[in-house]
Image: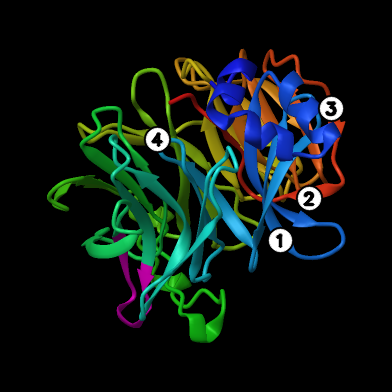
């Protein structure tokens, strides 16, 4: 984790000196630093670094609404545009270099998520080959100025979050199964024929290692976000696109050896999720899985060993989740940060609105 001294050492004195006095103080005092796309109250979009204690450390302007942020092992951050956006902004959390804007190639747009190779030399991003309703992983050469050097198939439609497994060699991709095309904005074009899946893909070859689907009767359950537990199982959250009166289970896990299942949340808890999981994250030790529903103003912490809810938090428009030192931290579209599941973080309100995801910066 970017503890206070580690962050200052990486940032350098020049960055701290360049901040406004209250921001320099916030950086000095910060125990943990988090990143999120935000919407400014006065209008416009940005990415922000904030402290767990409730201070804004710095912001990076975005041309439009951002979605998720990923960090390189070498320290760079990348903010991806919200679907169907065509930009990604590369930035240095220390402020030592100017941000760089990356534009998706013709015929593709970003889905808001990506990951770096273990050595930080390649960036991978989930993208839409929209004329062919085909999901791809775009491959970008970091040393070459983030030039796009190729792509892999995701073996599905509408890929959303992608993660690099602990082996450093395998991607897991949540194919949401929903066809969209920028000519129609965010309109979902194939709700009757959706085909969501989880795909395991070789990082070097782009070959399909394995693919799992839920029961065919759940084909309108779009798999969107994921996190690893302490056993390297892939926990996932879904968004249901079927009849609003239905209440299918929304949270489950998959393993690379072919197991996939939904856990049984109690009826009242499931109802609170309102058929929508907006983010999934694991605690630092993988012993808790956080699940959010901004539609239901609910954050859950699940014990992956017992598949039971062990903590919950009511948070209006709460969506972002990240690990902190001992539990989970949640953010909201109303500007709040709050800890749960053992986190000591108090409820804090910022003069900005957090977007869907919250990320803890990690040490190099």
- Measure the C-alpha gap from mark 1 to mark 4: 26 Å
Residue closer to the observer: 298 or 123: 123
Colouring mode (rainbow / by chain / secondary structure / one colour): rainbow
Q: Which residues are magenta?
A: 128-138
Q: Is residue 60 left or right of residue 195?
A: right
Residue indicated by mark 1: 45
Residue closer to the observer: 279 or 351: 351
Is 187 inside the magenta-drawn segment? no
Which circle's residue, 1 or 4, is located before the other in the chain? 1
Mark linked to residue 74: 4
Residue indicated by mark 2: 353
Which label sits in the foreground, 1 or 2? 1
Q: Residues within 10 Å of mark 3 (few under 14, many from 20)?
A: some
**Helix, strand or loop at mark 4:** loop
Residue indicated by mark 3: 347
Which circle's residue, 2 or 4, is located before the other in the chain? 4
Q: At x 35% / y 59%, what residue is drawn?
A: 145
Q: At x 49% / y 80%, what residue is drawn?
A: 182
Which circle's residue, 1 or 2, is located before the other in the chain? 1
Which label sits in the foreground, 2 or 4? 4
Which circle's residue, 2 or 3, is located before the other in the chain? 3
| Residue 151, quarter of picture | bottom left
Q: At x 64% / y 49%, what residue is drawn?
A: 356
Can you give x and y, in whole percent of width and height, for residue 107 in the image?
Answer: 36, 80
Which circle's residue, 3 or 1, is located before the other in the chain? 1
- Measure the C-alpha gap from mark 2 to mark 4: 28 Å
- Measure the C-alpha gap from mark 1 to mark 2: 10 Å
Q: Would residue 289 be seen by someone viewing this image from the given angle?
A: yes
Which circle's residue, 4 or 3, is located before the other in the chain? 4
**Helix, strand or loop at mark 1:** strand
- Measure the C-alpha gap from mark 4 to mark 3: 32 Å
């Amino acid at each position: 984790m970017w503890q206070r001294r580690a962050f200052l050492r990486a940032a350098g004195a020049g960055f701290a000196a360049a901040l406004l006095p209250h921001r320099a103080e916030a950086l000095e005092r910060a125990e943990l630093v988090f990143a999120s796309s935000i919407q400014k109250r006065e209008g416009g979009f940005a990415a922000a670094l904030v402290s767990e204690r409730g201070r804004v450390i710095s912001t990076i302007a975005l041309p439009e609404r951002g979605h998720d942020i990923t960090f390189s092992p070498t320290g760079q951050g990348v903010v991806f545009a919200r679907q169907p956006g065509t930009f990604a902004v590369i930035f240095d959390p220390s402020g030592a270099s100017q941000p760089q804007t990356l534009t998706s190639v013709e015929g593709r747009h970003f889905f808001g998520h990506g990951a770096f190779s273990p050595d930080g030399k390649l960036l991978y991003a989930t993208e839409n080959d929209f004329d062919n309703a085909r999901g791809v992983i775009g491959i970008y050469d970091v040393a070459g100025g983030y030039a796009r050097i190729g792509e892999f198939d995701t073996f599905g439609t509408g890929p959303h979050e992608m993660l690099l497994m602990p082996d450093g060699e395998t991607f897991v991709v949540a194919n949401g199964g929903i066809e969209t095309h920028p000519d129609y904005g965010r309109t979902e074009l194939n709700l009757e024929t959706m085909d969501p899946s989880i795909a395991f893909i070789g990082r070097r070859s782009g070959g399909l290692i394995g693919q799992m689907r839920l029961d065919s009767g759940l084909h309108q359950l779009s798999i969107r976000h994921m996190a690893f537990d302490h056993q390297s199982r892939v926990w996932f959250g879904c968004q249901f696109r079927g009849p609003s009166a239905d209440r299918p289970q929304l949270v489950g896990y998959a393993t690379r050896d072919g197991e996939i299942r939904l856990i049984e949340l109690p009826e009242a808890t499931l109802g609170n999720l309102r058929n929508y999981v907006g983010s999934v994250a694991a605690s630092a030790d993988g012993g808790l899985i956080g699940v959010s529903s901004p539609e239901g103003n609910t954050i859950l912490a699940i014990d992956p060993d017992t598949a039971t809810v062990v903590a919950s938090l009511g948070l209006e428009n709460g969506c972002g989740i990240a690990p902190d030192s001992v539990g989970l931290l949640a953010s909201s579209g109303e500007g709040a940060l709050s800890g749960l599941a053992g986190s000591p973080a108090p409820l804090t309100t910022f003069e900005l609105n957090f977007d869907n995801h919250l990320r803890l910066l990690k040490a190099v």
